[in-house]
Amino acid sequence: NAGVTQTPKFRILKIGQSMTLQCTQDMNHNYMYWYRQDPGMGLKLIYYSVGAGITDKGEVPNGYNVSRSTTEDFPLRLELAAPSQTSVYFCASRGEVQETQYFGPGTRLLVL
Amino acid sequence: LAKTTQPISMDSYEGQEVNITCSHNNIATNDYITWYQQFPSQGPRFIIQGYKTKVTNEVASLFIPADRKSSTLSLPRVSLSDTAVYYCLVGAGGTGRRALTFGSGTRLQVQP
């Protein structure tokens, strides 16, 4: 049981490039979340999903897109990278009843 | 979503008990209170969750007064490894399209 895994761990992008951050969980959780965390700050919700085929915007969705074709995977897409998207990105999942979210190790993204 | 307020930082020494209080005046009837711990360069980790009175596990205790407008996370006999950021979150238990909001947290520094 690996929990929540994220790839890559670290990436440098040039302005205008695109990339997909991968997130996979093996706990059969319906709820999945993407957060970003800027230095010294708390986490801000980007997008979340309550099940395969269903996604919703969080606090800061602009510049990002998500999809949820399977229960296990919840990729986050950056289409036109901007310096303001330099951050650490965390994916999380939780079960149906328990409020506990399980977090992945994070992806550190630097946009230059 | 109920807004939470907690101290920005706290200092302690090894072996002491640390109490971190969180206020959540607008907590709703079906809201649970959850605390997470985050170490640098890691995702948040669940510590404890409660609805009312007192909850204890192997890591911490959570005290919730009858009016539930605040809660106190108690860490007994802290060690250097307890140096981290602690987040208090309030949200509804159960199903539904909902995501928790992370504030800035409380940065706990444990000194030798």
Image: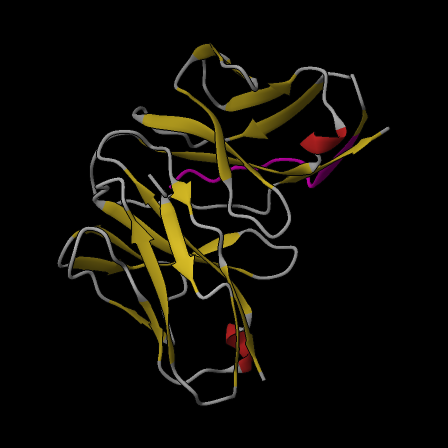
Q: How is the image coloured?
A: secondary structure
**In the rendered structure, which segment of residues is drawn in magenta?**
B1-11
Residue A78 point in image, percent of width and height: 38, 76
Q: How many numbered circles are shown?
A: 0
Q: Position of residue A65 (x, y in %)?
A: 30, 71
- The residue lying at 18 percent from left, 51 percent from top is A71
- Residue farthest toward the right in the current orientation of the protein: B112
- Magenta stretch holds residue B7: yes
Residue A62 as seen in the image, left or right of residue A30: right
The verdict on residue B36 being magenta is no
User: Which residue of the protein is positioned furthest toward the left in this rendering?
Assistant: A53
* Left or right of A60 in this view: B73: right
Residue B42 relative to residue A54: left or right: right
Residue projecting furthest to the front: A1
- Front-lying residue, A31 or A58: A31
Please name whichever residue, B19 or A52, is drawn nearer the observer in this view of the structure: A52
Which residue is located at x 24 percent, y 30 percent?
A97
Q: Position of residue B94 (x, y in %)?
A: 24, 30
Is A54 rendered above or below residue A19? above
Relative height, residue A19 to residue B63 (above, below) = below
Residue at x 58%, y 21% (from the top left corner): B72
- Tell which of B56 and B29 is nearer to you: B56
Quadrant (top left/top right/bottom left/bottom right) for the N terminus of chain B = top left
Figure check: B77 above or below A36: above
Look at the magenta stretch and give its main secondary structure. loop
Instruction: Please tell me which residue lies in front, A54 or A28.
Output: A28
Which of the image's four quarters has the C terminus of chain B? Answer: top right
Give residue A9's position: percent from left, percent from top: 50, 63
The structure residue drawn at horizontal position 50% and vertical position 37%, both measured from the top left corner, is B45
